[in-house]
Amino acid sequence: MTDISLSPQQAAAVAKAPSNSIFRHARYIIAENPVTGLSFGLFLFIALCALIGPYLVPYDPLASDTMAALKGPSLHHWFGTDQLGRDIFSRVIVATRLDFIIAVSSVVLVFAMGGLAGIAAGFFGGWTDRIVGRISDTIMAFPLFVLAMGIVAALGNTVTNIVLATAIINFPLYVRVARTEANVRREAGFVQAARLSGNGEFRILLMHILPNIMPIMMVQVSLTMGYAILNAAGLSFIGLGVRPPTPEWGIMVAEGAGNIISGEWWIALFPGAALMVAVFCFNLLGDGLRDLVDPQRRT
Amino acid sequence: MLGLMSKRMLLVIPNLIGVVIITFLLTRALPGDPAAYFAGPAATKEAIEQVRVKLGLDKSLIVQFGRYVADLGHLDLGNSLTTGQPVLTELKNRLPASAELTLFGLILSMVIAIPLGILAAVKQGSWIDHTCRIVTTAGVSLPVFFTGLLLVYVFYFLLGWSPPPLGRLDVFFSPPPQITGFYLIDSLLNRDLATFRAALSQLLLPGFTLCIFSLAPIARMTRASMLAVLASDFVRTARASGLDSRTVVLTYAFRNAMLPVVTTLGMVFSFLLGANVLVEKVFAWPGIGSYAVEALISSDFAPVQGFVLTMAILYVALNLIIDILYGVIDPRVRLEA
């Protein structure tokens, strides 16, 4: 027994090695592809805006000032003002939180629903697999944005239902990834070992399979975050979910849409650009994370 | 080939059943009491009960589903509350506008994306490859309504090249006599070049908006599958046999590389049909998307349900066509069937 037990220093070194190598690998990825580094930085900036942005903005996002309506970008109003004289810079920053919350909560929701359903389908096979597969096939039979419109229209025009609809249309994607990964590991050595030591099937599923496919699911999360934001903004652009005067990027673009033909470009441009930057950031981040997690699929 | 087609059509049936069940559930999930809603705000209790019986809402869910399917069998999608017209008639009248826009956008994007993807693969690492990468990454990040507005600002307001973004045809023109419902084709059939030009100028901006949006997946897929095919043995053999690279790329590699691209078209259509709704809103395009949006805003549910169902059926049909097309292009699929 003594020859396989490790001294405390050795144990610490062994425990430290994997985290150290992950860190080194992350640094390697970032150094190799500076765009990934940039997207990590951008992500931090967006998260910061969502967290403390509302306390830092120079103007109240809802306060109108008809004297200063429809002014272009200036030193006082960096992004200009809208029809009611509200400061667009403040509104764009404050909106970050709502858009971020919608995207994150819908992704968390679909992660829980689709991830678990997918793992169960891949692990148990048989009827579970058939039922889950049929549900996601049926969702995929709709053009996704159209289905989201239908869901929000039917369940009621609220932000919660936008989150729900966005989660539902992403469901098949998560199921597919989780199912494949769980299926591959179904008869893996560590699963057999867990079964032999008396673990129940559900316990194996949650304690052994789930942690194993977590990294791949996280990549899927960041890849769908961008799509979730686009989808939510699209829904609020056509007048669903978020109501004026709440600042939200999609609805702000919609508010500025009428002024584009008369040349007041800044009302729609800045929220639209914020939306674009956020989606761009999440897409790049997803690619970067994929490189980190799955070296074979490196872009 | 016929065997393959009928086999594939059988596979559509469970999809259609699923679609009908979901749209049925969506109609029954309306917030509050649908009977009170359809009876109107001023209705008395008896009136609400009458509507409930008339709509069959007092029956069990199964019976209601039977009635719903029977109505669908009679092609009855209900009436719009705001216009009082049958939903099906309005959808039918507006469908050509949407179809023309979507197909125009798709054709534009294929004309640009496929050569771009091929060039990027053939000249891997060159500036064309980098352009391709930038275009595809930017394309998936741009919200489609935002692209549309930017194009309007630049080409209508700044440059003045484009007519105002208000519908399919300028008010000074009258629509060509309806043959296909596509203004471009109808005006040509009618030999009316002025109308053709007017319709085209209205179509260009929304078409390009959809094109930019769907460019990314097509170009990315073309590049990836071209790269895979160019590295394969038969291309090497063709090169070794002394065929010039033009023949190798365009005749041998291209045809094989098209297969995965055709498969991606299914996904592209899913995006396009959704994006269509947003583009129609930006350009005041009188298609089925803007019809559904107007109905949504006035809480008029029958048109929205009809729209969702129509789009789903269209999408299932498009996927079927794509699969059959796949069999036409790839002889191996035919042999398997």
Image (cartoon, rainbow, N blue to C red):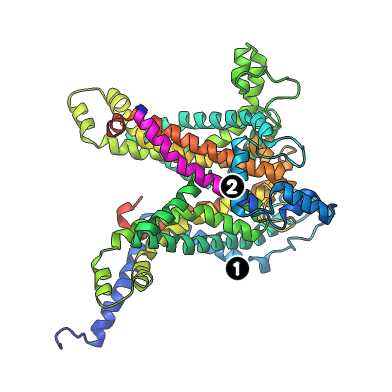
Q: Residues within 10 Å of mark 2 (few under 14, many from 20)?
A: many
- Whether residue B11 is in magenta: the answer is yes
Q: Is residue A131 left or right of residue B306?
A: left
**Front residue (pair A266, A113):** A113
Tell me if residue A163 comes above or below residue B178 in the rendering.
Answer: below
Instruction: Judge by depth and name the residue closer to the eye, A233 or B178.
Output: B178
- Asked whether the beta carbons under mark 2 and mark 1 sit within 8 Å of each other, the answer is no
Segment tinted magenta in the rendering:
B3-21
Disc 1 secondary structure class: helix
Q: Is residue A115 above or below residue B266?
A: below
Residue where numbered disc 2 is placed = B23
Location of residue A104 in the rendering, given as x and y in whole percent from the top left corner? 54, 62
Estimate the x, y position of residue A298 in percent, counting from the top left: 34, 52
Classify the position of the C terminus of chain B by image quarter. top left
Q: Residue at x 68, y 43 (%)?
A: B302
- What numbered label is drawn on residue B85? none
Label 1 crowding class (10 Å Cα cut-off): few <14, some 14-19, many 20+?
Answer: some
Q: Nearer the viewer, mark 2 or mark 1?
A: 2
Check disc 2 and report its element: helix, strand or loop: helix
**Is residue B310 on the magenta stretch?**
no
Residue at the image position 28 percent from the left and 23 percent from the top: B247
| Visible residue check, residue A185 | yes
Q: Whole-Å distance between the Cαs marked 2 and 1?
A: 39 Å
| Rendered image quadrant of residue B279 | top right
Amino acid on which the number 1 mark rests in the picture:
Leu
Q: Is residue A204 above or below residue A253?
A: below
Chain name for mark 2? B
Residue A137 x, y percent position in the rendering: 45, 48
Chain for disc number 1: A
Residue assigned mark 1? A51
User: Which residue is located at x 80 percent, y 50 percent?
Assistant: B40
